[in-house]
Image: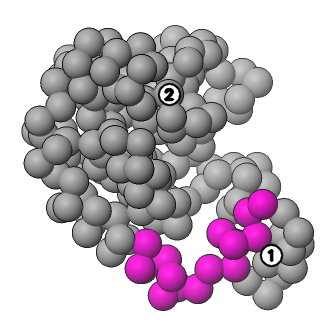
Amino acid sequence: MKETAPKHRWQYDADFVARTRLEYHLGMLGTEVLNRAYRQRFLAASKRIVIVPPCMRLQPEEKCKAVATPFGARCQACTPTCRVHQLTRLGEKKGFDVFIMPDELRVFAKGNGGENGPGPGPVGVVGISCALTNWSGGWDTDGIGVPAQGLLLDYPGCSYHWDKKGIPTDINFKQLEELLK
């Protein structure tokens, strides 16, 4: 924090890199509290979507072949060892769609391609991100009427906030499957 936070002083991500360990843990707790509060609404949704952060890609953005859609980029299977690719394949087997984080969560709100997202009927969203942004994303989706569940990355590694080169991040796939039940 002594080295990194001053470099981000006037940038949009200054709050992220200056958070204390306690705030990080409170973000973890916030995700759990919101997951419990929104669980029944999420389970009632007829369709499930998982949105992943760009840091889960194995390839850098300029090499990733994902295709832009209104709901976020969709994996095109360019790299079999990429976690987004593996998650997309799991989604094909288990009946959920995967998108790389859209610019705006409002694309999943009512009136945007269905009752509240791509396809017919209500959509439940699982948002994957680091502990510092997951709980606020849960509040944001609730604010637009979208039932959501949050899943934390195993570790943060994006080039925007944490590592200059970026480290492909990962999730616990078993925990994701539990959320989607």
Mark 2 neighbour density, 10 Å: few (under 14) some (14–19) many (20 or more): some
Label at residue 4:
1
- Residue 8: say if magenta: no
Q: Nearer the viewer, residue 43 or 115?
A: 115
The secondary structure type at the circle numbered 2 is helix
Q: Is residue 68 visible?
A: yes
Q: Quadrant of the N terminus?
A: bottom right
Extent of the magenta region: 12-27
Q: Quadrant of the C terminus?
A: top left
Compared to residue 46, the image places residue 67 above or below, namely: above
* Residue 30 image point, x, y percent: 35, 71
- Residue 16: say if magenta: yes
Q: Name the residue carrying label 2.
A: 107
Q: Nearer the viewer, residue 149 or 104?
A: 104
Residue type, numbered disc 2? Val
Q: Nearer the viewer, residue 41 or 50?
A: 41
Label at residue 102:
none
Compared to residue 157, the image places residue 1 above or below, namely: below
Residue found 69% across the figure and 72% down from its top: 15
Q: Is residue 126 visible?
A: no
Residue found 57% across the figure and 32% down from its top: 102
